[in-house]
């Protein structure tokens, strides 16, 4: 019954699957191979190593008990055969042999396998720009890149850097360079928002503001034309459609491609993103070959479509599933909802499911709300505002996605995780209105923000609340389409009335009923309060009194406006 | 179609239901009545008011926009009729009339209703002890008690206090008295552990240690016999089965009873805990009468049994459901899994579902694991250890409960919430092994502790891991039943070998294979490492080599031992 298992790739999924096999089937022979000599590392830790939060690169290669996860460790402690600097060249599926090449001496040989695991990861996309090969231009996909970049910045060779790509890694790298090293950093993103695959534009706007506040220059909607410099002095500037940015370092983080060449050359099925296709057991189209991690496509459990989801967390979880299945057990990996979190200086971001744009593309009719609320009981001393966007399908009321931001990182993650684990089941909005998350004043409000977000969205779907989100509000207001009715107290609203004059009307909610005559009936009204609930009540009142039927309630109120566009506020506000 | 709704009780659920009705059915007449003159307050905030985190008691009665929620507010802004100091005496169900009494002038009258809502809350249990009526002995169930106690402590009248009852409120009150005011506080609990309905004994032991570390004397398994003092000088001491504790203040928090007298006298069905019985729409056995909050019993979604679950968070969520249903909509409240969290000085606790004891009582065959792991990536600077206990049914692998502790409060809550929202569905353990919670190094490990807890429990159920929990370990070790095999490095294990001598054997995991001959074969072996995974691998190795078939892996390893019993460690460890 003992089998020989060969595993190609030894970063995250490979070692996980290998060790799992050896634990439950100790008699199996397991060979783990990798092109690199540095294996089994926490690649997601690279920005923290470069930014100085992690002093020593070995920490990214060590267990939590501080044991270095090198070849010796996997051989001696885990009982694997490890071959580093070894490339898998071709799979002979008929004879179940893997052709490999030793990258040190060039020798080739054939390895027999009973089961093969492809953990071939992904390759960073390198756009074909003039100057892309200059010294000082680097992707950031392994520890060698990490070392090189940290060496450059720590030796003071980098005064100015350009990061190309406004996804998670680009943002983390921009922070790493700025925060510890004071490198003057510019982040360039081709799309008109940061994190375009993770957040809606309304939730991405505050991310940009927060990065700018922390000294990073953020250029959106700009395309890089070429990189300037020479082979002796290295990179000197990045030229975009609009500007030329001098720099000594360029980091490319514009995306990755599934590493599926070995698989596709062997005739294994791949998907529309070139990822290897796998079933629930994580078997490829050849039942003796498993695959997982960044090289595969998995089902998105909300949209139903396959896509790559290159996250270290999923790779590790898949590794155990593959290990169990090869060792004779039966476990499933159903798919992903794209749960994701990110620290950006003092701001925490988390999200899961589909954005509004992705939901529309997947054929849903997405409706969304944004709710702003204290993350603890509002009277608890260290409370901070949290910002949650919730998205559901108009027809089915199925929840499609959630996006959240706030300064208590774990608190942000906690709200998103609780919804994320339900998303794959096609959870209805009603389930979130009564969702039972923990409550005590140091942790949450009695009506948690997540319950209130669901309530707010339900109110929109039922037609009680007519919303406008912050992006549209800013557009309408600045375009002079409608005037604001601010139902906060005169003390709170006063500075806004002073700044915006006749476009900003203030009537305290408590006086609204007796001052209905003052409300303009012929113009669209944009209703605001501190965070949205009072202006929602004002909307209901105006409707029930037949005062103005063209009112919209600004989602998240002044809280969301200030979060997205701090300059909107009156001076010294 | 406009209806008249009368709501009895105006603390949490009552106002919530009333305002929801007025929002979606503005033409309805809604009467809100309460015995007290102080209404709509955050009762859960009382310990934080007494402990000084909340300066002003008005904060507990205000909205997040700092508007005081008094009768005027509910009348003017929300359009309710509010009657305070008014008691509901009897329900005439046939004629749909509620008899009420004004507590100021004693006048009685009848209120007509179309729909009646009972939000009559709960009554604190006052044990029939000698001295229970002495001045200085108080329950803590409303703002008047809160004011009285804060006055006493802030005026320096209390040097020593006794809190009777080791549930959440008792613990919060003990912290409040100690932390700001330096009151010498003793907490007495009749059972042999703190939080007996929330945690297992293993997870409750560290809570006791943490309270003791913060200066609170904790007496377990002691029964209070009487309270000593006189009506002039007030309370002077509490006498228990074992001791006499001098004090100037006694706080009673030994439980509450559903306030269901009005309902049961009107012939409404009540349950085995005397809570009012309600259906999914939160209707009582009379379809024109709704009830919710602390006065009802709701289904426990794991055990299937009805029980009271007196939490402000549930009351608020139920309030909206009742409001919607009365206003003509249709919403459901399915039940509870008892999700709960608590801050105890620097320690955060969260839990959901059933404890091992409760699971056994409900007819399950509970199996549990305890896992200790960093709450962020182990290399991330501010990581802290987190402690998670996961419980599942042996036969069905259905997850039954989770308990967690750690010093990053939100991080603890986040793991429990993510499991809690699945618990009511009868979620299988496999779902938790691949549960997709967010990951980035500042938030979690790639394999989150919650995934690893599920993996560990799965390994136990599959027979790979044979566990022993910390309570049993301490008993066995101290009873000299078995010796420890510590597979950490000699540097880590050395002090333990020195302290415990021949009962503590150390072989580094890396050398285990070559030193099998040193392992005793005739005695039970208790396997430990830092947190459990390495000693689990050692267990597998010993089994596969046929060395010793009586090994047990200490759940959570040294981490859990130190958390539960800091004195177990060698000096200066």
Image: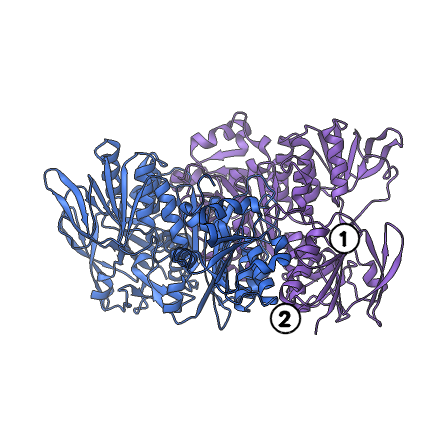
Chain colours: A blue, B purple
Q: Which mark is residue B329?
A: 2
Which residue is under mark 1? B122
Residue A8: percent from left, percent from top: 27, 55
Asked if labels 2 and 1 share a chain, the reply is: yes
Q: Numbered disc 2: what chain? A: B
Residue B474: percent from left, percent from top: 61, 38
Can residue B266 be seen by looking at this rendering?
Answer: yes
Residue A545: percent from left, percent from top: 61, 66
Residue in the foreground of this view, choosing between B69 and B53: B69
Q: Give the residue drawn at x 22%, y 39%.
A: A148
Residue in the foreground of this view, choosing between A236 and B548: A236
Is the residue A412 above or below the residue B364 in the image? Answer: above
Q: Nearer the viewer, mark 2 or mark 1?
A: 2
Q: Is residue A367 left or right of residue A160?
A: right
What crowding class fits label 1: few (fewer than 14 Cα within 10 Å), some (14-19), or many (20 or more)?
A: many
Can residue A26 be seen by looking at this rendering?
Answer: no
Dot 2 or dot 1, earlier in sequence:
1
Q: Is residue A309 left or right of residue B276?
A: left
Q: Considering the numbered disc 1 on the image, is that residue within a helix, a strand or a loop?
A: strand
Q: Is residue A493 left or right of residue B59?
A: left
Residue A346: percent from left, percent from top: 42, 41
Residue in the foreground of this view, choosing between B262 and B535: B262
Count every numbered label the image shows and give the total.
2
What crowding class fits label 2: few (fewer than 14 Cα within 10 Å), some (14-19), or many (20 or more)?
A: few
Q: Give the residue drawn at x 54%, y 39%.
A: B407
Q: Give the residue drawn at x 84%, y 35%.
A: B135
Residue furthest out toward the top: B572
Marks 2 and 1, how far apart at CA: 28 Å
Q: Considering the numbered disc 2 on the image, is that residue within a helix, a strand or a loop?
A: loop
């Amino acid at each position: 019954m003992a089998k020989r298992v060969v595993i190609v790739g030894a970063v995250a999924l490979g070692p996980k699957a290998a060790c799992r096999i050896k634990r439950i089937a100790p008699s199996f022979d397991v060979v783990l191979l990798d092109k690199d000599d540095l294996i089994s590392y926490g690649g997601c830790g690279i920005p923290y190593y470069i930014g100085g939060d992690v002093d020593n690169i070995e920490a990214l290669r060590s267990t939590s008990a501080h044991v270095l996860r090198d070849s010796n460790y996997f051989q001696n402690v885990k009982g694997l055969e490890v071959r580093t600097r070894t490339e898998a060249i071709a799979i002979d599926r008929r004879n179940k042999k893997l052709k490999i090449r030793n990258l040190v001496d060039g020798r080739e040989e054939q390895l027999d396998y009973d089961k093969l695991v492809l953990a071939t990861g992904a390759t960073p996309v390198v756009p074909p720009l003039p100057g892309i090969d200059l010294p000082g231009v680097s992707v950031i996909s392994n520890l060698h890149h990490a070392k090189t970049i940290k060496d450059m910045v720590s030796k003071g060779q980098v005064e100015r850097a350009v990061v190309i790509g406004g996804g998670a890694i680009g943002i983390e790298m921009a922070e790493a360079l700025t925060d510890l090293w004071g490198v003057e950093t510019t982040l360039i993103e081709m799309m008109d928002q940061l994190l375009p695959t993770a957040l809606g534009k309304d939730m991405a706007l505050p991310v940009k503001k927060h990065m700018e506040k922390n000294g990073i220059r953020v250029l959106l909607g700009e395309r890089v034309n070429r990189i300037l410099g020479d082979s002796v002095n290295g990179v000197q500037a990045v030229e975009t459609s609009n500007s030329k940015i001098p720099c000594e370092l360029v980091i490319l983080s514009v995306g990755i491609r599934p590493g599926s060449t070995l698989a596709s050359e062997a005739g294994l099925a791949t998907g529309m993103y070139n990822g290897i296709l796998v079933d629930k057991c994580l078997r490829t189209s050849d039942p003796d070959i498993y695959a997982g991690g960044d090289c595969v496509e998995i089902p998105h459990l909300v949209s139903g479509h396959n896509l790559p989801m290159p996250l270290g967390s999923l790779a590790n979880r898949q590794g155990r599933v593959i290990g169990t299945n090869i060792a004779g057990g039966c476990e499933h990996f159903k798919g992903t909802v794209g749960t994701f979190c990110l620290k950006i200086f003092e701001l925490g971001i988390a999200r899961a499911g589909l954005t509004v744009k992705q939901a529309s593309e997947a054929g849903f009719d997405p409706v969304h709300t944004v709710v702003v609320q204290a993350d603890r009981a509002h009277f608890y001393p260290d409370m901070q505002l949290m910002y949650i966007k919730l998205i559901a399908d108009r027809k089915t009321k199925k929840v499609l996605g959630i996006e959240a931001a706030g300064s208590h990182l774990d608190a942000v993650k906690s709200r998103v995780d609780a919804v994320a684990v339900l998303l794959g089941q096609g959870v209805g909005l009603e389930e979130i209105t009564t969702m039972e998350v923990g409550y005590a004043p140091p942790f949450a409000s009695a009506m948690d923000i997540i319950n209130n977000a669901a309530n707010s969205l339900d109110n929109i779907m039922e037609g009680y609340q007519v919303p406008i989100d912050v992006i549209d509000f800013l557009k309408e207001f600045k375009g002079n389409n409608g005037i604001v009715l601010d139902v906060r107290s005169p003390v709170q609203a006063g500075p806004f009335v002073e700044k915006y004059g006749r476009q900003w009307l203030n009537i305290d909610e408590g006086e609204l009923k007796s001052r209905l005559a003052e409300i303009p009936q012929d113009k669209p009204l944009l209703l605001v309060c501190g965070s949205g609930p009072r202006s929602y009540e004002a909307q209901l009142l105006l409707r029930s009194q037949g005062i103005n039927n063209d009112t919209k309630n600004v989602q998240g109120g002044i809280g969301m406006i200030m979060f997205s566009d701090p300059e909107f506020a009156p001076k010294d506000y």
